[in-house]
Image: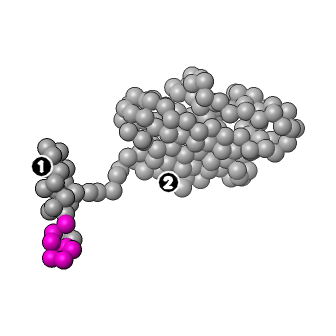
C-alpha cells in the first residue's frame, strides 16, 4: 500500500521529482544494504605476541561472510573504501606495545601505540582504499595484546 498524506501518494511525487531532474531514482524500491560488514571479538584466548596476527573466536556480525575470525583476516569482496576499527588491551609487563593494520600481509603505516606498562587501551581507526581480494588484518609488531576479552575488530564498506 502506497504511503499517502492527505490522499496523495508521496512516493509517486518523490519519484516524479527526481525524474523531472533527470535522475533515475526509485524511492519505492529501497532495500537494506548487503554491503560487507563485520564485528569480531576474542575471549578466553592466550595473549597475542609480537610477530602474530590477532585472531578471534566470537563473531557478532559477518554480513557476506568476508571475515575469517579464526585467522583474523577480512577479504574485500569488492573494490572501494572500507573503514576498520580495532580496540584492544595491552598485557601487563610490556612497556611498549605496537599494532598495525596490514594489507595483504604488508604494513600500511596505520598503527596503534601504547607506552604504558600494564593493562592499557590500544586502538586503530582508519579508512582505506582496497581492491577486490585485498586482505586486511591486525598484526602485533611489539609487545602483547590481551587475549581474554577486550579485543574487538570491526569493518564495513563505505563506498
Q: Residue furthest bottom?
A: 6
Identify the secondary structure beneath mark 2.
strand
The answer to whether residue 73 of the structure is visible from this angle is: no
Give residue 49's position: percent from left, percent from top.
Answer: 74, 34
Distance between the alpha carbons at the discs numbered 1 and 2: 40 Å
Give residue 125's position: percent from left, percent from top.
Answer: 59, 39
Q: Is residue 9 magenta?
A: yes
Q: Which residues are magenta?
A: 4-10
Give residue 97's position: percent from left, percent from top.
Answer: 77, 33
Whichever of callouts 1 and 2 sits on the residue coming sooner in the sequence is: 1
Please name the residue that numbered disc 1 is placed on.
20
Q: What residue lies at 69% left-to-right and 44% top-to-bottom?
A: 88
Quarter of the picture holding the N terminus: bottom left
Q: What residue lies at 51% left-to-right and 43% top-to-bottom?
A: 155
The one of 66 and 21 positioned closer to us in this rendering: 21
In the rendered view, would you say 32 is above or below 103?
below
Q: Is residue 68 magenta?
A: no
Tell me: 32 left or right of 143: left
Please name the residue that numbered disc 2 is placed on.
61
For residue 94, which quarter of the picture? top right
Identify the secondary structure beneath mark 1.
helix
Q: What residue lies at 54% left-to-right and 40% top-to-bottom?
A: 84
Tell me: 37 left or right of 60: left
Disc 2 crowd rating (10 Å Cα; few below 14, some 14-19, many 20+) is some
Q: What residue lies at 70% left-to-right and 50% top-to-bottom?
A: 150
Tell me: 13 left or right of 118: left
Amino acid at each position: 500500500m502506497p504511503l499517502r498524506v492527505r490522499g496523495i501518494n508521496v512516493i509517486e511525487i518523490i519519484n516524479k521529482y527526481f525524474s523531472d531532474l533527470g535522475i533515475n531514482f526509485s524511492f519505492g524500491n529501497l532495500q537494506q544494504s548487503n554491503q560487507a560488514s563485520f564485528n569480531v571479538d576474542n575471549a578466553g584466548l592466550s595473549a597475542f605476541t609480537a610477530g602474530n596476527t590477532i585472531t578471534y573466536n566470537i563473531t557478532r556480525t559477518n554480513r557476506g561472510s568476508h571475515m575469517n575470525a579464526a585467522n583474523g583476516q577480512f577479504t574485500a569482496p569488492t573494490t572501494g573504501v572500507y573503514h576498520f576499527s580495532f580496540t584492544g588491551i595491552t598485557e601487563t609487563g610490556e612497556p611498549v606495545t605496537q599494532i598495525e593494520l596490514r594489507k595483504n600481509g604488508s604494513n600500511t603505516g596505520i598503527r596503534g601505540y601504547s607506552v604504558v606498562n600494564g593493562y592499557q587501551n590500544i586502538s586503530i581507526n582508519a579508512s582505506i582504499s582496497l581492491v577486490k581480494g585485498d586482505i586486511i588484518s591486525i598484526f602485533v609488531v611489539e609487545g602483547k595484546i590481551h587475549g581474554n576479552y577486550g579485543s574487538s575488530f570491526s569493518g564495513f564498506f563505505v563506498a
